[in-house]
Image: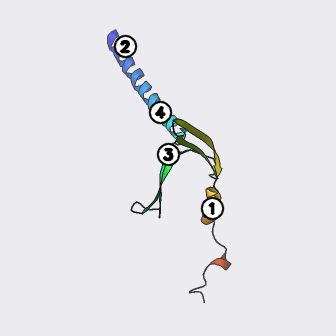
Amino acid sequence: MCSLLKVSNMKKIAVLLLIALFVCQGISFASAPLDYKVTKLFQEPSAGSKLVYEIPVEVRLVDISEDANWYKVKIFFNLGPVRFAYEGWAEIPVGETLLSRLQPKPLAELPQEGLP
């Protein structure tokens, strides 16, 4: 009887540890920095678009500021046997642009078609 209790408790502890592991993994995944490679530029924002330019340097998007207007980027390139790496923040006001597109337009700017 005593050994059954020990096995039952060990199962409970194992299940709790697995749940804690998955929760911690989810939290660390959600807060993990971005790491997207940018290697190609396309003519349009679609999968079947024409390739305009293949970037000869390695560019990685690492992080985005909370207001989505600043982007942390790493740039790597080789010049002969020497590898250069730069990391910094670039201001691209995507957050402001998206916010202005989502705000409702005043009535004066709406088309007057169909109004009496």
Question: At 64% across and 72% down in the image, what residue appears?
Answer: 105
Residue type beneath disc 4? Gln
Q: Earlier in the sequence, mark 1 or mark 4?
A: 4
Secondary structure type for disc 3 = strand
Q: Where is mark 1, residue-wise?
A: 97
Q: Earlier in the sequence, mark 2 or mark 1?
A: 2
Q: Earlier in the sequence, mark 3 or mark 4?
A: 4
Density class for disc 1 (Cα within 10 Å; few <14, some 14-19, many ≥20) is few
Density class for disc 3 (Cα within 10 Å; few <14, some 14-19, many ≥20) is few
Q: CA distance from mark 2 to mark 1?
A: 60 Å
- Quadrant of the image for the N terminus? top left
In the figure, is residue 100 to the left or right of 56? right
Density class for disc 2 (Cα within 10 Å; few <14, some 14-19, many ≥20) is few
Q: In the displayed image of the protein, which residue is found farthest to the bottom? A: 116
Residue type beneath disc 1? Thr
Q: Earlier in the sequence, mark 3 or mark 2?
A: 2
Q: CA distance from mark 1 to mark 4?
A: 33 Å
Q: Where is mark 3, residue-wise?
A: 36
Residue 6's disc is: 2
Residue type beneath disc 2? Lys
Residue type beneath disc 3? Tyr
